[in-house]
């Protein structure tokens, strides 16, 4: 099938591109492919939302009843020690971390709303259809994508229900898969989009939604923490957002450049909830959702070139998240706005797609990412020096310090051998405040149709046992937030087991595996989590 | 031969059901909805019969809120020819649904009515049987195999004792089991085509059916949590505990 523009991914950047294109030229034929069973079902985000890009897309979003209701009314920042906590005055926070003009929202619900707007403008949205393959023209430019075949069994044979994938061709294809998109990854390599850039940096973010007691709920309150349970050398922190309906969005982000293979990001998050300052908020409440997703932390230095012949790479598929701001939705949407303008000029006036870069460099998005660039790398010196440097960089110089710090390593290179690093004893879940992975994954509604090929591909099937287990105690058992990877002992022989049906599509394994031995590819459409208002 | 297939919009089977805090019902906001799984089998079977040249038209019908249109659309995408949505905004019980379906049957005059054996939300397992009674048609419930004959159907039923094969005269009601077939996927081109197929919208109130609930729902509660098990050191201890604590032996 042929379209003017094919968009891969129904998140904030992809949907914004689709809507803006229709606003610029309603005659364009546009389709959006989404791997989740419905728009929003694979979206997971904090989220404290800055409306800047949305104001540009729909100045009347309030009248259109956008699901953006809870204004930030109060802010707190806590440094956690093991038992104590120290409140940091918000006026001493850099302006990028001040949120009084922002809103606490569910990004999944915002995407559902954006999808409704897009459909009413005539955009065709196809949930349940992952783009699994990039199609190229003879001259090497991107021609479009093919969707995944449906109805293939574990051995690769066609079942009765087999339905072949479809080729979707576009004058321009927009890749908006989110952080570590599996097609985006191929494009970055093929077109060397990351040439001359620092290696991309990632984090893993967890989120739970809790319904809490009235007395512990203060709608509009935004709280962040740093410190315990992480040590000085591990980058991370928490968020606690008091949303509407007595719900609290509680989350934790850990930089995937952590060094200790014994570290379990999931268990750090669970342990974090047992801190007296946190426990008192959720005690007596009920956990109603759980999820996890990798996110971009590299910023400006790691941002690849975002255009190539026939295609654009936008949002966090490229990496537009603003780390010190802890926000990526408005930047993803802005990249979608710029993409739409560039594509419209490309189609109408046959301008080269490189016009995207010109527009990007003139935009507030570029300026914002530039000013934010030195914060994350400064934390490679540890939490305390990072905070001191960030204070100087962000408060005194407002991001205009005349040098740029580098990201030196990819996240898969940072693990140290297991025997050199201390083991970490994590407390057992109490099933009230803390939970095991199995009961957490249960809340995500994750499923993949049985009897389909495993979508987590091992380049070398022996490596996990022959090397990674020996050297790093197979960290996949711990970094996976859904318990997909297990090392099981059978008759004294270790076996690497992949429970791919539990996969919540966070992409952490694809990023952190020390030998880059695991590749995440798209499973059958509609699989994965079924997040509600994440 | 004309086949009418009833489909229901329910909470997706993968979603963990959550009870509202005031115990007045379950949470449905921003929850993924899907076609009731055995209804997918019903549509699939009807489409297969049509593809085999034994039916002329497959009509999908749903009773529910405006958004149930998506469920009808899904049926159209896997091969139904046209759709009907009977709109009701309030809670609707199986008796009212059967009465509405009776009206649709009288209007459309199908030879067969297919539907899932029960819906996974309320698990009532009543609509097919009630419709058969209202129409005074024969019924074949829990079908795992359907063979079309001249003026009858041979239906294999999944019953507690095993398999039961019965023959029913047409017109008839068939409620379908999950073992009946493997529903196909809706392909992209067929989803596009389905967007152009007609869906007739009818208000339940215009059919003259009383849809008021006959059952008063007092409250909805979650099932009690299972307590964690314990490990015992020996068989003796186990026997002792079963005898003295659990008092089962």
Image (cartoon, rainbow, N blue to C red):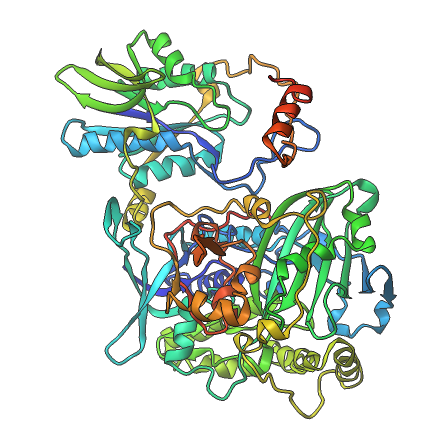
Would you say B249 lies left or right of A520 here? Answer: right
Q: Quadrant of residue A198?
A: bottom right
Would you say B15 lies left or right of A1 here? Answer: right
Residue visible at 81% across and 61% down in the picture: A75
Q: Is residue B222 visible?
A: no
Reply above or below: A150 against B8: below
Would you say A182 lies left or right of A367 here? Answer: left
Q: Quadrant of residue A227?
A: bottom right
The image position of residue A233, as x and y in percent, is: 70, 75
Reply above or below: A501 against A460: above
The image position of residue A28, as x and y in percent, is: 37, 63
Residue that protrudes farthest toward the bottom in the picture = A402
What is the count of numbered marks?
A: 0
The image position of residue A296, as x and y in percent, is: 57, 70
Residue visible at 46% across and 21% down in the picture: B204
Residue visible at 77% across and 59% down in the picture: A223
The image position of residue A494, as x and y in percent, is: 45, 59
Q: Quadrant of residue A392?
A: bottom right
């Amino acid at each position: 099938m042929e379209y003017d523009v094919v968009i891969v991914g129904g998140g904030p950047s992809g949907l914004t591109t689709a809507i803006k294109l229709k606003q610029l030229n309603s005659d364009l034929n546009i389709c959006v492919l989404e791997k989740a069973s419905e728009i929003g079902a694979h979206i997971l985000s904090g989220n404290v939302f800055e409306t800047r890009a949305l104001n540009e897309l729909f100045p009347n979003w309030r009248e259109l009843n956008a699901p953006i209701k809870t204004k930030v009314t109060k802010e707190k920042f806590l440094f956690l020690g093991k038992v104590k906590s120290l409140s940091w005055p918000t006026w001493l926070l850099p302006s990028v971390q001040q949120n009084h003009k922002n809103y606490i929202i569910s990004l999944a619900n915002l995407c559902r709303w954006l999808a409704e707007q897009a459909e009413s403008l005539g955009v065709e949205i196809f949930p349940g259809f992952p783009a699994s393959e990039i199609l190229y023209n003879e001259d090497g430019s991107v021609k479009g994508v093919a969707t995944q075949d449906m109805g293939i069994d574990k051995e690769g044979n066609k079942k009765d229900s087999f339905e072949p994938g479809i080729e979707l061709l576009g004058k321009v294809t927009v890749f908006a898969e989110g952080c570590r998109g599996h097609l985006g990854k191929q494009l970055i390599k093929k077109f060397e989009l990351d040439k001359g850039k620092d290696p991309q940096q990632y984090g893993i973010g967890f989120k739970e939604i809790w319904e809490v007691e009235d007395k512990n709920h203060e709608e509009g309150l935004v709280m962040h923490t740093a410190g315990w349970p992480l040590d000085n050398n591990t980058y991370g922190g928490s968020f606690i957002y008091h949303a509407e309906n007595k719900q609290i969005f509680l989350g934790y982000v850990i930089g995937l450049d952590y060094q200790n293979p014994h570290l379990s990001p999931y268990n750090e998050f669970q342990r974090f909830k047992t801190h007296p300052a946190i426990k008192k908020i959720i005690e007596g409440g009920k956990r109603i959702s759980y999820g996890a997703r990798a996110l971009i932390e590299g910023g400006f230095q790691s941002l690849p070139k975002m255009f190539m012949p026939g295609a654009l790479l936008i949002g966090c598929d490229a990496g537009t998240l603003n780390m010190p701001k802890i926000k990526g939705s408005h930047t993803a949407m802005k990249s979608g706005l710029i993409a739409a303008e560039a594509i419209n000029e490309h189609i109408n006036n046959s301008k080269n797609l490189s016009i995207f870069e010109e527009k990007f460099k003139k935009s507030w998005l570029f300026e914002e990412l530039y000013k934010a660039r030195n914060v994350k790398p400064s934390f490679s010196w540890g939490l305390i020096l990072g905070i001191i440097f960030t204070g100087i960089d962000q408060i005194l110089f407002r991001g205009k310090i005349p040098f740029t710090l580098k990201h030196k390593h990819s996240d898969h290179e940072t693990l140290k051998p297991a025997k050199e690093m201390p083991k970490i004893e994590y407390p057992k879940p109490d099933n009230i405040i803390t939970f095991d992975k199995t009961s957490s994954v249960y809340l995500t509604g994750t499923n993949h149709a049985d009897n389909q090929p495993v979508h987590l591909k091992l380049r070398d099937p022996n490596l996990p046992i022959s090397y990674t287990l020996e050297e790093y105690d197979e960290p996949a058992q711990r970094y996976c937030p859904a318990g997909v990877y297990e090392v099981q002992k059978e008759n004294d022989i270790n076996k690497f087991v992949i429970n791919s049906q539990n996969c919540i599509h966070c992409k952490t394994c694809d990023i952190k595996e020390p030998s880059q031995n695991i590749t995440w590819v798209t499973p059958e459409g509609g699989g994965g989590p079924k997040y509600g208002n994440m | 031969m004309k086949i009418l297939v009833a489909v229901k919009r329910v909470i997706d089977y993968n979603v963990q059901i959550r009870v509202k805090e005031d115990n007045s019902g379950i949470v449905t906001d921003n929850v993924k909805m899907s076609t009731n799984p055995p209804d997918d089998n019903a549509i699939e079977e009807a489409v297969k019969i049509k593809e085999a040249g034994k039916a002329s038209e497959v009509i999908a019908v749903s009773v529910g809120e405006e958004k149930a249109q998506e469920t009808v659309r899904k049926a159209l995408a896997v091969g139904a020819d046209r759709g009907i949505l009977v709109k009701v905004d309030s809670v609707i019980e199986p008796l009212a649904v059967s009465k509405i379906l009776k009206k649709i049957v009288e209007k459309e005059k199908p030879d067969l009515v297919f539907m899932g054996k029960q819906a996974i939300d309320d698990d009532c397992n009543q609509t097919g049987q009630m419709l058969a009674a209202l129409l005074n048609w024969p019924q074949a419930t829990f079908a795992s195999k359907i063979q079309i004959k001249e003026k009858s159907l041979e239906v294999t039923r999944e019953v507690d004792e095993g398999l039961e094969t019965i023959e029913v005269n047409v017109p008839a009601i068939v409620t379908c089991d999950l073992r009946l077939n493997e529903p196909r996927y809706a392909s992209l081109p067929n989803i596009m085509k389905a967007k152009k197929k007609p869906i007739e919208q009818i208000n339940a109130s215009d059919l003259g059916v009383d849809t008021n609930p006959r059952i008063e729902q007092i409250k909805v509660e979650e099932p009690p949590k299972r307590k964690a098990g314990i490990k015992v050191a020996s068989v003796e201890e186990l026997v002792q505990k079963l005898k003295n604590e659990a008092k089962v032996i």
